[in-house]
Amino acid sequence: MYLGVCSWSLQVGSIDELKSLMGHLGIRAVQIACGDPHHASWKEGDDMPKAALAAGLEMTGAMLGFPGEDYTTPATIEQTGGFGNPSTRAERMERLQWALDRTRQLGLRDLMMHAGFLPEPGSPERKPMLDTLARAAGLAAEKGVTLALETGQESAKLLRRTLDDLACPNLKVNFDPANMLLYNMGDPIEAVEILGPDIRSVHLKDAFPPKVAGEWGQEVPLGEGRANIPLFINTLRKVGFDGPLCIEREVGNQSERVRDIAKGYRLAKACLES
């Protein structure tokens, strides 16, 4: 395992800014936003991949968000996230194809995304959603890309069942322990053990679960919440994960985020070295 950072957590708008802040933090690797309203709008535009490669960035994978996703409340993201809404699936499939091309332009083979809320077995909405995810995985396979679905919007058992039902070799997991807590979807440690063989990458983030049903939990700096980062990292070791741990911070202004990421990096580094 090795440490990185999520580019959007640094709130940068250009590759030069990203490289500078990574140098300041002493972090060598980055999971980079493709470019979308939630994660980043790159000053370089279509030339962003060329600029990132010229800057010598060590990139672990790319991240896709869809225009129109609304994270105001759990209810709004359930309605607008990923491929959950049938009325937006066609345009989002086109956006996925764009992101797959950008992923390859960056010299990468991993693309992370939120699939949207997964319907439970027995729901009439489940087959259309799984058909959509199978098509997405197929498009990614044509480009030689692995799609890693981010955790949180469903229980680990439901995600495990979904991956098993789809049986797509290039459909994996981008594991975020804080999301499990923020969405109140179970214990992150147990979830690692359930999803272990398919964890492709990790967002290192921390949180407390919600105090009121239907509301968000509280994201906090790494090491200050319920994710139990030392045990979390040890559990990743236990299941054989040896990929990137990219620190993510989505609360606060840029200076606050940089401060929290620096602190989180020191904690995670100590855990890896113990």
Image (spheres, rainbow, N blue to C red):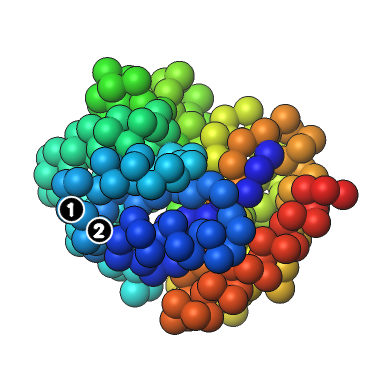
Q: Left or right: where does residue 267 sit relative to residue 54? A: right
Residue at 72% x, 57% y is 268
Residue for badge 2: 42
Whether residues under marks 1 and 2 lie with C-beta atoms below 8 angstroms apart, the answer is yes
Residue 92 picture quarter: top left
**Residue 21 on image: x %, y %:** 48, 65
Would residue 139 be seen by someone viewing this image from the given angle? Answer: yes
Residue at 26% x, 41% y is 50
- Above/below status of 87 relative to 208: above
Residue at 38% x, 64% y is 17
Residue 149 picture quarter: top left
Label 1 neighbour load within 10 Å: few <14, some 14-19, many 20+ = few
Q: Left or right: where does residue 90 sit relative to residue 6? A: left
Viewer-side residue, 253 vs 202: 253
How many labels sit on residues? Answer: 2
Label 2 neighbour load within 10 Å: few <14, some 14-19, many 20+ = some
Q: Which mark is residue 85?
A: none
Residue 43 picture quarter: bottom left
- Above/below status of 187 relative to 139: below
Amino acid, disc 1: Gly
**Residue 118 on image: x %, y %:** 39, 44
Viewer-side residue, 90 vs 94: 94
Viewer-side residue, 101 vs 186: 101
Q: Which mark is residue 45?
A: 1
Viewer-side residue, 118 vs 203: 203
Residue at 57% x, 30% y is 198
- Above/below status of 45 relative to 103: below
- Above/below status of 122 relative to 63: above
Would residue 158 be seen by someone viewing this image from the given angle? Answer: no
**Residue 67 on image: x %, y %:** 20, 58
